[in-house]
Amino acid sequence: MGTGMVSAEFSGDVQTILPKEIDWGDRDSDSEVLLESALRSPVGSKRLCDLVGSGESVAVLVSDITRPVPSRRLLTHLFSELLVAGVERDALIVFGLGLHRSMSEEERREILVEHYRRRHVEHDRERCTYLGETSQGTPVEIFSRVAECDRIVCTGNIDFHYYAGYTGGAKALLPGVSSTQSIIKNHSLMLDETSVAGRIDGAVRRDIDEAGRIAGVDFTFDVVLDSEKRIVHAACGDMVRAHREGVRVVDEMYKIGVEPADVVIVSPGGMPKDINLYQAHKALENVKDAVRDGGAIILVAACPEGYGNATFESWLDRCVRPEDAIALFHEDFVMGGHKAALIAKLSLEKDLYLVSGKNRDFADKAYFKHAPTLQNALSRAIGDRKQAQILIVPYGGTTLLST
């Protein structure tokens, strides 16, 4: 939880679900070699140093502090390629915030490290350029500083996403550096039944990829991380083909079939995945199908930044009962409010417990049962079951359970 650990005594049928170990064969385990090798052999594309012409400007899109992307390491290798192309000084690092808050100078420095001295800027949702519209009606409006550049390079990590199917690829562009209108229209497609975790052809992902083509994303550089946040795979090149190669690895490592359980104990995987409840919620979506009807999910998440989204919190304030949040969601789709509705819906189907170090009011307002310790939550969740089936999922932010 956060940067620490919690513990409890268990009885019953207990199973810990961990990412699968993969035999990488003769592939060098050194992640720096993986990154360099990927850039030398891009998927479906020329090398970046051959793709970018002399005198061209380049926007390099990177994730904000809420993502575990090793951006500093990706940038080191990308800028080596851009140096060969002779455009290193013309590159602009752009932090994609989506609908997230702005970052502090300290957070930007923490992400960039030695690259902090390079030109960088945060995405501004109010300063965007219209480039077209997707077939699903999403306006492609991207940060003007990005639109003005000759080339666009997306960076990120690939794991499951509860309505985009997977992170990575052109998601650095939409929602990363898009207008509020574009983001809300794209995210409203989560209401489509195909928009679920682990599905690559869902409505939201199709829309993201189409927006990337309209905007002219030239190159992507994504990594897959293991449970210790070490790089185990790197894929770069064509926006779609390289991304799908990474998706294959994610499925092999993190898509796990299980028997339904009475209780699932899940952690998003520590910081930054449990920086706030808005982010930690994703772990619930990844494990919800593995809980029997009438069962319980115990979410272990530090949430040092509280709820993490003003709209999310305002919906929790307005909607005292979970039924109220669900009704409001169907009446008026609003980003941020959607998470209140999703948690509300799940709370009517399962018993939800929150172990966070936060007070009872914090949990109650978000439709959870407050638990001061994991032991307390587990005892209450098991109840009078003689032989409860319990699943422990330490890395719920990246592990997708299916039955």
Image: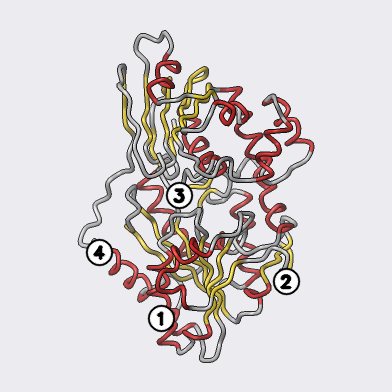
Q: Is residue 320 left or right of residue 46?
A: right
Classify mark 3: helix, strand or loop. Answer: loop
Q: Where is mark 3, residue-wise?
A: 272
**Rendered location of residue 197, percent (x, y):** 52, 43
CB atoms of marks 2 and 4 within 8 Å: no
Point out the tag, 1 or 2, that comes first from the N-terminus: 1
Q: Compared with residue 102, is residue 189 higher up or lower down, i.e. above or below?
A: above
- Callout 2, which amino acid? Thr
Q: Compared with residue 241, is residue 199 higher up or lower down, i.e. above or below?
A: above
Point 46% across, 71% down: residue: 237
- Callout 1, which amino acid? Glu
Classify mark 2: helix, strand or loop. Answer: strand
In depth, the one of 382 and 223 nearer the eye is 382
Q: Which mark is residue 30?
A: 4
Mark 3 and mark 1: span between their CA atoms? 29 Å
The number of discs equals: 4
Q: Compared with residue 267, is residue 167 higher up or lower down, i.e. above or below?
A: below
CB atoms of marks 3 and 2 within 8 Å: no
Categorize mark 4 by other alpha carbons within 10 Å: few (<14), some (14-19), many (20+): few
Mark 1 and mark 2: span between their CA atoms? 28 Å
**Rendered location of residue 58, percent (x, y):** 55, 80
Point out the tag, 3 or 4, that comes first from the N-terminus: 4
Mark 3 and mark 2: span between their CA atoms? 31 Å
Q: Where is mark 2, residue-wise?
A: 129
**Rendered location of residue 56, percent (x, y):** 56, 87
